Image: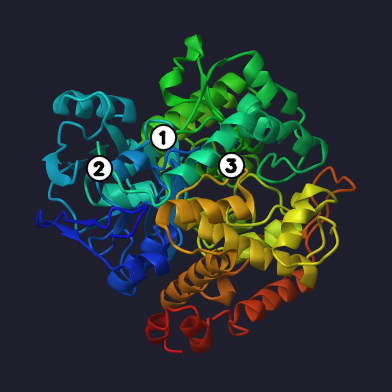
Amino acid sequence: MPKGHNGKILRVNLSNGRIAKEEYDETFYRTYYGGRGFNAYFLFKEVPVGADPMGPENRLVFSLGPLTGAPISGSGRSSVGAKSPLTGGYGEAEAGGFFGAELKHAGFDAIVVEGKAAKPVYLWVHDGEAEVRDASKLWGMNTLESQEAIRSELGDGRIRTAQIGPGGENLVRFACVINDLKHAAGRCGMGAVMGSKNLKAVAARGRGGPEWADPELIRKHAKWIADNFMQVSGGMHNLGTSGGLIDLSKNGGLPTRNFQTGVFEHAEAITGQTMADTILVGRENCYACVIRCKRAVKVDELGVIPEYGGPEYETMAALGSDCGVGDLKAIAKGNQLCNAYSLDTIATGNVIAFAMECYERGLLTREDTGGIDLRFGNAEAMLAVLEKIARREGIGGLLAEGVARAAKKIGKGAEELAMHVKGQEFPMHEPRIKQGLGVGYSLSPTGADHCHNIHDTTMRPGPGMDRIRAMGLNIPPLAFNDIGPDKMSYYTHAVNWSSFGNCIGMCLFLPWGFDRTVELVRGATGWNATLFELMKVGERMNSLLRAYNVREGITAKDDTLPKRMFQQIGDPLPTTAPLKEKEWQAAKQFYYAVMGWSSDGVPTRAKLQELGVGWAADAIGV
């Protein structure tokens, strides 16, 4: 059994109720590591070409990394993967909290769910055992209600859950999976896949767990972060991810009114500092983490309770500035509703902002909205439409399809107002101020994504450049709007590293750096891991995901950006500028070439073979 893992993967067939425990050799574990790697392997190997993402042939994979559940800050991450209902290609989302660690301690490294239950069920995983239980009474409940019901039924208040609410049950294409009520595996519509299988929840409880190869080495790093977290992550502790919101607005990079501008006149009202001064009632943590970056808020007059946590940056911008809403309490309410209904806050805010622009341009009427005055800045309208999306009522049924499909159905030029790539809605980062990130949106295997991407701000003079040089890149600081070969060289290395990060089960906000991460992998697994190996794991995943998407008909023609990104942002500042089509196309071709892909963005057989996944070449006919 490999250290840092349990050596067991749970397979659950919901169609016939069969449950099996599978074992894989150490070569499998070291090739795919966990998380994204396990997702990619099982989806590629087992989901038929062209399968309906919300059909029984799709797989839903809950996967952990070698460091998930280790006694160290940042180790609470888990991943969930499936063919995406939004993009029709590879889908994946990560979440923090406690569920992943609990599943690890319950004795499994992953759960592969196949088929579809005849009626609502939940999966109960505990101390090396698993059973499928009836969830008929839970169907229709919000996530707090169902978690309490599961804990009551099983008689254990320490059970951790990964579950869906009405949004997932109603197959909202951007429904997410909610861990522990407040940690969202938000992107790609994984909650819709869960709902399509009639799977309400996975409940986990464990009192065991894997053996760590070098517990003392892990303890050493745990002590370092405990002693130094205020120096290295104090901003995250104090203000969470929304600490930089006001600076983004000042520099023109805060998505506002459906990305029409990057400056929000009410930015001060929705900053992390304003939240800390008004509605914040607590700072919370994920498993074993000393940073405590999670927010807990309370708004009595709107029924906002701390059990659902509080909004992070992406939510503040998506439900706030992007919708023109400067009401922090309303944003907190929207965040709670998304967590209760299992909706991705990024996509929810994006699709409502899109609808608001359509409404203001006359593409949607008050009759279409069911009487809702869907203007930018109307907080009540934002919340009302959110409720309708979760239940697929009226205008909500259209918007629940996601911004790309909704725009196509509306027509009349609405597609130019839809901020997405490959069908997945934009995160809250402006490509016309961070242009390397914009190229990353177009290249991402999951559609627009800001996590397995670069943020051009890291290439300013200072400590960030030391990290870049440690990748072997002896390049100078670069402007935000530079997307030339040096920027794309950095992008290639950085996304390989972040792709590995999605395999390992560690939070991307922790300041571990390269050397400490290598040591932590060694401490968990006992492998003689090197930075070179970890980077190759990330490269392997990026090429494997590309091959999967090619198999599903997603190629270079889909590496696009909305026309708006090539137009001047409203209220232009010296820091903002539209992308240039010729430079953007050249940047993508450079990336294809560096990755060992064809000019059409298809991985070559030689590259896939060199990465140890030559079997994928046969699947795509190269």
Q: In the rendered structure, which disc, 3 or 2, sits on the residue that comes first in sequence?
A: 2
Task: Mark 3 and mark 1 in contact? Answer it, CB < 8 Å.
Answer: no
The residue that appears at 46% across and 76% down in the rendered structure is 547
Distance from Cα at disc 3 to Cα at disc 2: 25 Å
Q: Position of residue 115 (x, y in %)?
A: 19, 59
Q: Nearer the viewer, residue 606 or 15?
A: 606
Residue 510's disc is: 3
Circle 2 Cα neighbour tier, 10 Å, few/some/many (<14 / 14–19 / ≥20): many
544 up-or-down from 109: above or below: below
Q: Secondary structure at mark 2?
A: loop
Distance from Cα at disc 3 to Cα at disc 1: 37 Å
Horizontal relation, residue 135 to residue 570: left or right: left
Residue designated by label 1: 388
Horizontal relation, residue 468 to residue 211: left or right: right
Amino acid on which the number 1 mark rests in the picture? Lys
Circle 1 Cα neighbour tier, 10 Å, few/some/many (<14 / 14–19 / ≥20): some
Residue lying at the far right of the rendered structure: 574
Q: Position of residue 311 (x, y in %)?
A: 55, 29
Amino acid on which the number 2 mark rests in the picture? Ala
Q: Position of residue 472 (x, y in %)?
A: 72, 67
The residue that appears at 65% across and 61% down in the rendered structure is 494
Screen quadrant of the N terminus: bottom left
514 up-or-down from 586: above or below: above
Residue designated by label 2: 106
Distance from Cα at disc 2 to Cα at disc 1: 37 Å
The residue that appears at 37% across and 49% down in the rendered structure is 212
Amino acid on which the number 3 mark rests in the picture? Leu
Residue 587 in view (yes/no): yes
Which quadrant holds residue 91? bottom left
Circle 3 Cα neighbour tier, 10 Å, few/some/many (<14 / 14–19 / ≥20): some
Q: In the rendered structure, which disc, 3 or 1, sits on the residue that comes first in sequence?
A: 1
Q: Nearer the viewer, residue 151 or 231?
A: 231
